Image: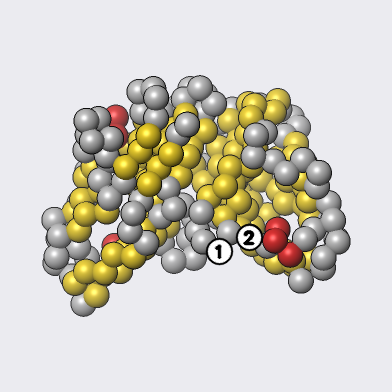
Amino acid sequence: AQRVTQPEKLLSVFKGAPVELKCNYSYSGSPELFWYVQYSRQRLQLLLRHISRESIKGFTADLNKGETSFHLKKPFAQEEDSAMYYCALMNTGFQKLVFGTGTRLLVSP
Amino acid sequence: GEEVAQTPKHLVRGEGQKAKLYCAPIKGHSYVFWYQQVLKNEFKFLISFQNENVFDETGMPKERFSAKCLPNSPCSLEIQATKLEDSAVYFCASSLQGSNYGYTFGSGTRLTVV
């Protein structure tokens, strides 16, 4: 069975501090992993895909198959990063995204 | 267009009434998905379509929920005889066939059952 676990419901940091939002997954196949962000009252937006190995808005995420993790990191948090962050795993057979329960990031001045 | 368009933005129904939600996927996207987001922020998968065919309906409460994606029409999600626990934000998303780009989400329809 596929499962995505985000152990932290809330992560509160000060502006300029490093951020790491944790994500662990279980999946029997080769995973395709994503991070989505939902700013207040806005639609869910794709932030990162693991296959592209890109950096968006200063965020990066590395797939660690040994630890089955895909943690999201940013070295210096900004106030505008405050949002809900969802880690998601794609079940490629059914083209279905399985979401974690989300982590709310709150960046204070 | 390049956005997934969902209507209406808000919908209020009395218990037992019918609710119908609409979603226009991005042109050229062959997969459409419906998710339900309740207060705990969890996204529950409901159903997916590949073009106008049901692809995966494992998440649908079949007694009262139904969905369609007909050619040249917005997709729809219909709830017969709504219950209080149906109150949620319903998100639609679309994606390219065989995509590893993830989905593009609509802005959601907030359904409130009173």
Three-letter residue code for mark 1: Leu
Residue A8 image position (x, y, % from top left): 33, 58
Q: Earlier in the sequence, mark 2 or mark 1?
A: 1
Three-letter residue code for mark 2: Ala
Q: Which chain hosts label 2? A: B
Residue A43 as seen in the image, left or right of residue A14: right
Question: Residue visible at 22% across and 65% down?
Answer: A78
Image quadrant holding the C terminus of chain A, namely bottom left
Residue A54 image position (x, y, % from top left): 23, 38
SS under mark 2: strand
Are dots 2 and 1 in contact, CB under 8 Å?
A: yes
Question: Residue visible at 76% across and 71% down?
Answer: B114
Q: Is residue B18 above or below residue A1?
A: below
Label 2 to label 1: alpha-carbon separation: 7 Å
| Dot 1 alpha-carbon crowd within 10 angstroms: few under 14, some 14 to 19, many 20 or more | few
Q: Residue at the bottom extreme?
A: A109
Residue topped by disc 2:
B88
Question: Residue visible at 21% across and 54% down?
Answer: A20
| Dot 2 alpha-carbon crowd within 10 angstroms: few under 14, some 14 to 19, many 20 or more | some
Residue A44 image position (x, y, % from top left): 46, 52
Same chain check for tags 2 and 1: yes
Residue A57 visible in the current orientation = no
Nearer to the camera, A35 or B106: A35
Q: Which mark is residue B39?
A: 1
Question: Residue visible at 82% across and 68% down?
Answer: B14
Colouring rule applied to residues: secondary structure
Residue B7 visible in the current orientation = yes
Residue B97 as seen in the image, left or right of residue A108: right
